[in-house]
Each structure stands twice: as structure tokens, then as C-alpha cells.
Image (tube, rainbow, N blue to C red):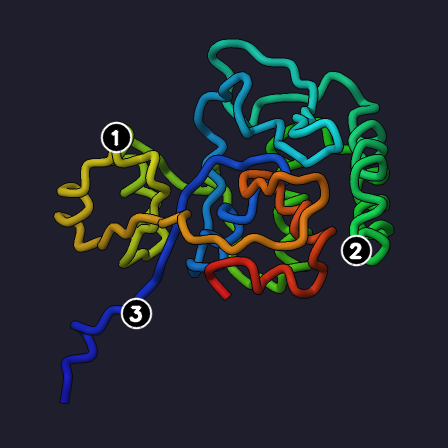
Amino acid sequence: MKDAKKLKKMKKIAILQSNYIPWKGYFDMINMVDEFVLYDTVQFTKNDWRNRNLIKTQKGLEWITIPVQHTLSQKINETKIFDKKWNKKHFHTLITNYSKSAYFKDYKDTFENYYFQNTEEFLSRINYGFITKINEILNIKTLISRSEDFKIYGEKTEKLIAICKQAGATEYISGPAAKSYLDEKLFQQENIKVTWMDYSGYCEYNQLFPPFEHGVSILDLIFNEGKNATKFMKSF
């Protein structure tokens, strides 16, 4: 008989900063783990994915950006919105560019209600709301946590390990961009396996306004493929 004390339940975790209506790869990573931590207790970065994302338009790719107040030192979860009409503007932009997509009508009311009822003043909470709403649409059941609920200490890699240990992780899934700074040896010392996310090999789907572009908001996939959206993702 195996020693029950030596058995440890396998648990996969990912830790990423929150994005505004992220692309499909972001949600694939969420769906691949048991717990996904929104790492919003780090510095807000200007002109990044935190408060903006790309959509397809007849004129090409277009950024839709949540206007925020920011300083050089503030954290993502401290970042506030300064234009309270941003939600109406964004939804109008979605109507303009996606009203002719095959499944827009199926999700119009869901997003219209969410945009117009959104009274949050902090960017981090807005991102969390959209991420959880989209998880529901895609039927993703992963636990979503916030880094502010963990005790974080040390340098870059050590901070990630601290979250992993408190969450009981045995495997950490990371985006490929972290290869430039992540110290895998420190994870090995804690018996935590590091797996690198692979964003290659996505299939194209029915998309308005060619040429095809993978790196746009997940809303593009949802509006164009509806319930078939997950067939064009890698984790389902």
C-alpha cells in the first residue's frame, strides 16, 4: 500500500496580469489550469493589454481602450477609470463592427447589459468582471483568484513561487514571454513543475474583414462562431 502521506494532489496554476477582454490564448491558459491568479498587485504599464485590446474593423485592426488615471508607481488594482462613458462608447464600437457577424445577436443582450450596468471605477475589477463573464459563455470552470489575497515576497520568480506554494500548486503554466526572466531552478527546488504555454497552431475561423488575424479579443471569436467558439481553441 502506498504511503498516503507521500501522495500529493496534482494542481496546475497560472498567474497573469488581468487584461481587458483578452484574446483566445488567455482563456486557453485559464482553461488549462485548476486555479488562475490575476496578478494585479504589480505596476500598471501604459499602452499595454491591461486596459485595451484589439478588434477587427473594415478599416483594419482597431484598439478599444478604457481611459484610466495612472502614475509611474501605481499598481494595476489601484488604477481608476476617468471617463465614466467609456462603457457606452465601447459597446457602440462593438455594434458598429460586429452587428453583421453570425452570432452577434445571440450575445448582444448579454454584453449590452453588462457594459451599461458596469459602474466599477477600478480597472482590475472591470477586467475581472469581463473575464468571469466570458468564462461562463465558454463554460470554463476554473477557479479565479486575485494576487491581493496572497502573501507575496521576494524577487520576480520568488513572488510567483510564493503564490504557487500558498495555492498548493504542483505545476506552474507560464506564458512564453516569461522565459527571459523566470528562474526554473527555483521552481525545481520547491518541486513545482514549469510548463510553457504554446500559442502556435491555432486554426482560422469565420472572421469578418480579411485578412485573418489571431491576436484579437476573444469577443471576435464568440461573435463569429457562437457556441462553436471552443472548437477553435486549444484547451477543449
On residue 9, which mark appears? 3
Contact check, label 2 and label 3, Cβ < 8 Å:
no
Q: Is residue 102 above or below residue 72?
A: below
Count all numbered tags in the image, as a single digit. 3
Mark 1 crowd level (few <14, some 14–19, many ≥20, 10 Å Cα) = few
Q: Position of residue 208 (x, y in %)?
A: 72, 44
User: Is 167 positioned to the left or the right of 68 in the image?
Assistant: left
The disc, 1 or 3, on the residue closer to the chain's N-terminal end is 3
Name the residue located 25 percent from the left edge and 50 percent from the top edge.
194
Mark 2: which secondary structure? loop
Q: Nearer the viewer, residue 207 or 216?
A: 207
Q: Position of residue 229 (x, y in %)?
A: 63, 59
Q: Is residue 124 above or below residue 67?
A: below
Q: Nearer the viewer, mark 1 or mark 2?
A: 2
Name the residue located 67 percent from the left edge and 24 percent from the top edge.
65
In which image quadrant can residue 80 be found?
top right
The residue sitting at the top extreme is: 72
The residue sitting at the bottom extreme is: 1
The disc labelled 1 sits on which kind of residue? Ser
User: Is 83 positioned to the left or the right of 131 in the image?
Assistant: right
On residue 102, which mark appears? 2
